[in-house]
Image (tube, coloured by chain):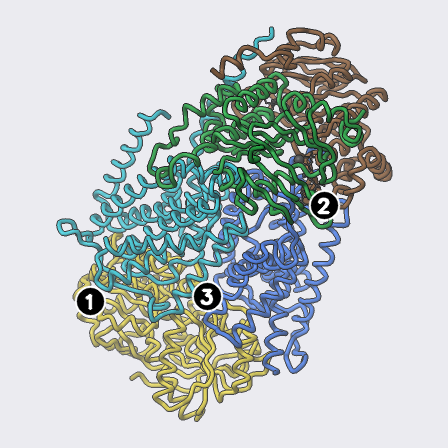
Chain colours: A brown, B green, C blue, D yellow, E cyan
Amino acid sequence: MLELKNIHGGYGKITILNGVSFSIPKGSITTVIGPNGAGKSTVFKAIFGLLNIHSGQVLLDGKDVTRNTPRQMIGHGVTYVPQGRNVVPQLSVYHNLELGGITATDQAKVRQRIETVMDQFPMLRQFRDRKAIELSGGQQKQLEVARALLLDPKLILIDEPSIGLSPNLVQEVFRTLVRLRDKGVTILMVEQNARSALAISDYGLVLELGQTRMHDEAGKLLADPRVGQLFLGGHVGGDAAEAES
Amino acid sequence: MSMPVLSVRNIEKSFGGIRAVNGVSFDVHKGEILGLIGPNGSGKSTLFNCILGQLPPDGGDVSVNGRNVSGMRASDLNRLGVGRTFQQLSVFPKMSVLDNIILAGQEHHGSMLSRLFGPGDAGLTAEAEKLIAFFRLSHLRDTLAGSLSYGQQKLVDAAMAFMAGPSLVLLDEPAGGVNLTMLAGLKERLTAYNAEHGTTFVVIEHNMEFVMSLCTRIIVLSEGSIIAEGTPDEIRANQAVIDAYLGG
Amino acid sequence: MSQFSQVVLSGLATGSIYALVAIGFTLVWQAAQTVNFAQGEFVMLPAFFVLAGMSLFGLSFGTALLFGLAVSVVVLGLLFKKLVAEPILPHGGITLIIATMALGILLKESVKEFYSAEAQPFPSIFPNDPIDVFGAVLSMQDILNLAFSLAVVVALTLFLNRTRTGRCMQATAQNPAVAEILGVNVKRMILYTFLINAALAALASFLITPVYLAKFSNGETLGLIAFIAAIVGGFNQIRGALAGGLLIGVLDNLTAAYVTAEYRAALPLVLLIVIILVRPQGLLGTKEGRAV
Amino acid sequence: EETVKLGMVAELSGPGAPAGINWRDGIKIAAEEINAEGGILGKKVEVGEYDTQTDPQVSRAMVQKAIDDGAFAILGTIYSGSTMVNMLVAQQNSIPQFVGSEAPSIVEKGNPFVYRTSSGAQKGVPALTKYFTDTLKAKKVGVAWLNNEFGKGGHDVFVEEMKKAGIEVIVDVASEQAQTDYASDVAKLKDANPEAVFVYMNQEESARFLIEAKKQGLAMPLVGEVTLTEAKVIELAGAAAEGAIAHVGVTATATEVPGIAAFSTKFEETFKRKPTHDAIKGYVGAWTTKYVTEMVGEFDGEAFSAKMQGLCLKAADYPKILLDTCWDDRGEMSRPSFMVQVKDGAPTVIGTIAAD
Amino acid sequence: MNVRMRTLSILGLVALAIAAPIGQGNYIIYVLTSWLVFAIAAMGLNLTLGYAGQISLAQAAFMAIGAYVTSLLTLAGWHWILAMPLALLACFVVGLLLGYPALRVKGHFLAFVTLAFNTLVFLVLRNEDWLTGGSYGLVGMPRPDFGLFSTMKQLHFYYFTLGVTVLAALAMWGIVRSPWGRAFKALRENPIRAESLGVDTRRITLLAFAIGSAYGGLAGALVAPLVQFIEPGSFGVAHSLRILLMVVVGGSGYFFGPFLGAAVVILLPEVLRFAEGYYLIIYSALVIVMLVFVPSGLIGVWGRLHEKFWPRHEIRADLKEGAGLK
Ligand SMILES: Nc1ncnc2c1ncn2[C@@H]1O[C@H](COP(=O)(O)OP(=O)(O)OP(=O)(O)O)[C@@H](O)[C@H]1O
Ligand SMILES: Nc1ncnc2c1ncn2[C@@H]1O[C@H](COP(=O)(O)OP(=O)(O)OP(=O)(O)O)[C@@H](O)[C@H]1O
Ligand SMILES: [Mg+2]
Ligand SMILES: [Mg+2]
């Protein structure tokens, strides 16, 4: 479904990705893990046309979509939820949601979906007419996640959805992703909350130093002791302790 | 019992009809690591902002080490030894990591005048570098903070709270986006600091594993009011908390 | 008494002119989150397009107006967006401020060099016959200016808040990165903003030049006062521009007539400072929300 | 072939541009004519253009630059504020300077190198007093003026003159440069209802004032100095200018003077517009430079200055001086002047005032 | 650039500034002197705007205050060296006052408050003619005489100005590299966070205005003896905008930006003089073009060119070694 071939790219003169390659099958959830600054978010930006790619290819269903603009990517059925806060501050919650479906031709359907996501995240209905900027951090994140569910995407790129969400809502988001996967949507997710994320994933991908290090079934990665030690905090590495002294 | 480091009495705050914080009172004692949890929008960040002078509360009092600090400006509070982080990333994007960290400490060294005529780094470079090394950011020392990844910025943000040698630190979601291994390091740092300097912490966090293993006591906020208070185990077992927050 | 009503009513008439220009500021702010310091020149220029249409191509006044409108939309809308606003917008507000200041000089000096350094008469679209209102003399022109500003305020407010395109324009202004990720055609939204702004500037130009006379330097004070009107009224609300414009128009006249003529230019400034200190969001503006 | 340089320092941009550009164009015509007649002392005239941007500090620099570039004489500036500064530079270098400024203070500094091309406000405005006392027989008058160094000069002299003549100024209205709304100014005048109003403003301001005056039906005579009846003002104000009266030093409309008529025609042919009095001033300044230099017989600033003291040139002998003109030992000039009124959309000479 | 290279190039620049006027006409020396004077004013604005992030469009007003105080005192017989500190003090105090609105508003709004202030200063200077000479201005201020060194000559005055400029630049260097400089930047980037870290943002904001204004005052104190004539019109809003242009064109937030910017804004018109009436048109067009291609100011041009012709993709240090999972 999505395939990256030896992507090199970065910001300005600094190269961040040094040959990222992987492919993910249709209708699966893949979780990307890796240390802070490994280039996870950068990979997403590369796919979605927000990064200066020096070389390599992004293929979507076999079609070359390297360096397509975000609008084109949406046209291909890809949506993207970036890391951090990404709402339109002075527009109301409802109008923020509406923007999530702005590219759809069938607006009636979008309105209907808005009702559905508002059922799923009741807070959104409660604060329907409030400005997005006035919401709390987690409420804004809910808004963002909900906003990504309004179209009929083939592929969802979702970067750390759990930041700021209360535990029950994290579970709710994961359940939603599983439901979508079961309907045939492909999901690529970055999560530091890696244990829970890998638990619902089909595949896991370890990224480090701008390169893919491991790519395997999620269960196998969870079981791998090296992964556990280095990225899942199973045990504090020697480095951190050394640095302190 | 000794005087509480932080004492919060009846804090109230509304935003045009929404009662974000609804008469919250609690005490934090020296050396405690207090967890503050609760559903999204329950008023945790607003409570922090009211305590620390970023927002004027509608009512209530705050005292630090027995001194009433209601209405005090954030910078003065900080000089009393109260540090904090924000929920949203807030580093200084166009300053290097080192400058970010030094800035966090410089106002605690010398007078206004000595800061003009004294050394450019206020004598803090070595200390800052140690802190940077601890968070494994040494190679990024001279990089602009704005071009770090989310998690790296979060670490810089946390590091800044320690620079001034505070006696009380309020952390708003320090774990969000931080890699689990680094997070374990952060936890260790907090505990060690707490043990060594007796520094008191109040931590807002949604990462339950982190909160439960770090905190000695936890307060649960819901719709602006405290609905539960207790040790991690008590909270984990509290049905009201499970319903409102933790989920099944 | 007749002096008083004359001063107040004339003030309203002048104020409606300030309002028309100020609306341009608030529109560009709401839809692109930036300030066009050449706005005064944008209002000065279209009248010259009309004059050029008449003198160079021998057009009738009516046709020349249409010609002027079309050229303004292309030059002040399309070209401005493509050559100045779009490349500079990503580099931030202050850079664009400087660029538009330079643009103001460019437009002003070009008119001076290529058309004329001297003021030119400009025909009035509406009859200029005096009308007696409460012992004061007004003209049809004055009344229509007021009506027109009001209509523009209502129309634009509805457009920005009640249509999806309007909201997409706001989204583009407030958070272009997010707008882009959601698939909003960011470039087109910016284009809309500047096209509308150009058309408004042209209409304002046609309405005020009969009074102001066509001169290359007209934009200088006009742009400044209009901007102050926009701030006083409330920058993030289109209707604020109208309130601010009228207020300044009337107060200016009242000061000149009853307080001091030497310091009349100080009045809008003092008003501005007071408003900003007492109510930073402006008279009709709304607060921009949480900061922490 | 040898040339002689003249430094034309004027307000070519900024608010003073209309005046400066006319000044420049008047000089252009003069230079062409002078060169056609063989230049000055056989040397072709070369006019260097220096733009002051209507900024006194820049004007000072520009005069300095013109002198560095080897200018033998300076022509300009028009705005009195600029002239006040830059005349010091010309004086230090003993360079003759013809200026278009009318502020009284210019000739009060005892600078022997500065010469006017039109009489200062302290001469022009008093010429009007007779009109107020004898023709209008006014007892109570008003004044509407532009609050900058030009307008203030005229205003102060006028108020002083009226006091001397025993006429009471009952309403005094100041306005800003580039002001557009004259509603309150006119309303104030209307309310006070003087027998006549002295209007002292620049062109567009005059036009806007006249338009508003007409709108509110201001009935008393409006009397100005120079500007109020200029062709440009009439063009801008249209019917509202009808009846306005002004005292004019030298005017392109005084077509019965042969030199003026010839200059007007030539100017209109070249620049497709009517000359203003600034154009005539520039023209006269350039020609006087030639006449006086040739009288001296060499390019020498000191000698030029000596010659200028108390010099009188007759139009019969020196046709391009247009009207008989004298300079006193301070650089103030005097020549016959005219009273002009707008009739049927055209300025018409209604009287001549002899030089004093 | 390493420290030695930097020291060398700074010495080179100073040597250049010393040699520049030799053998030049008075006019060129005058232009060079105005370059230095405006560089001082721009340096001050650069502190307020470039480092502390507070847009101020009133720098010309402070030049006016500096110039009028100096003029009135020197005309009353004071020596410049005594008049100047008073002028600076006056500007510092007024600058503190102007800083107050900045505590309430930011960005464009602040820009216009300061612009309004500039116009108010203009109006006061024009209307209070009993003190300021009104629109006729003040004339004939003496140039300072230091016994053995009199600055009456244009060239001497240039060196005098150069000396003052170097001292002012050194002081500014001291400020921006001190913890104050860091606090200014913090104010620019994230005032709320800065406040929570103990930075007294209120005091820092006011200081940013006051110090920046004092530099404006110093420039004014030099303008008075340089031009020997001052009038309100020379300190209007247009001049503030010109100083702002210098800061942005040179590179705001860069120490040497103001010198470069002032040079361009003052000298470019000279270069374009051949274009006669069109020079302002060409000039403004050039400014726009520059902002499109080098928005960070001319000081960034070199980096841009380097990037363009010798593109390098470097791998950052952190991406060379990691936790070591192979
Ligand atoms: N805008 C930028 N400019 C320059 N460098 C950047 C920029 N954004 C990220 N980087 C650098 O690129 C590297 C990878 O960043 P990226 O955001 O992809 O990391 P990440 O794996 O998503 O980390 P995290 O888990 O912290 O979100 C980091 O070293 C970071 O410093
Ligand atoms: N400036 C504001 N204007 C209006 N409402 C606000 C404002 N700030 C906070 N609120 C509201 O107050 C409530 C509490 O917000 P707060 O940010 O304190 O929540 P929180 O507990 O920190 O939530 P989260 O876990 O999502 O960060 C929310 O409903 C929020 O929408
Ligand atoms: Mg990331
Ligand atoms: Mg929060």
Measured from the top left, where is residue C142 in percent x and y?
65, 71
Name the residue at 20% across, 67% down: D304
**Nearer the camera: disc 1 or disc 3:** 1
Labelled disc at residue D304: 1
Q: Residues within 10 Å of mark 3 (few under 14, many from 20)?
A: few
Q: Where in the figure is residue C289, as x and y percent of width and height?
A: 65, 46
Q: Marks 1 and 3: CB-CB under 8 Å?
A: no
Regarding residue C224, the answer to whether it shows in the image is yes
Name the residue at 43% across, 24% down.
B127
Query: Quick one: which residue is furthest to the left in this view?
Result: E148
Quarter of the rendered structure image containing ligand 2: top right
**Residue designated by label 2:** B19
Q: Residues within 10 Å of mark 1 (few under 14, many from 20)?
A: many
Vertical relation: E21 (above or below) A156: below
Q: Which residue is mark 3?
A: D269
Does label 1 point to a residue whose CB lies under 8 Å from ligand 1? no
Does residue C253 sit above or below E156 in this rendering? Answer: below
Screen quadrant of the C terminus of chain D: bottom left
Element type at mark 2:
strand
Q: Chain of mark 3?
A: D
Determine whether the residue tagged by mark 3 lies in a helix, strand or loop: helix
- Going by the numbered disc 1, the residue's amino acid type is Phe
Q: Nearer the viewer, mark 2 or mark 3?
A: 2
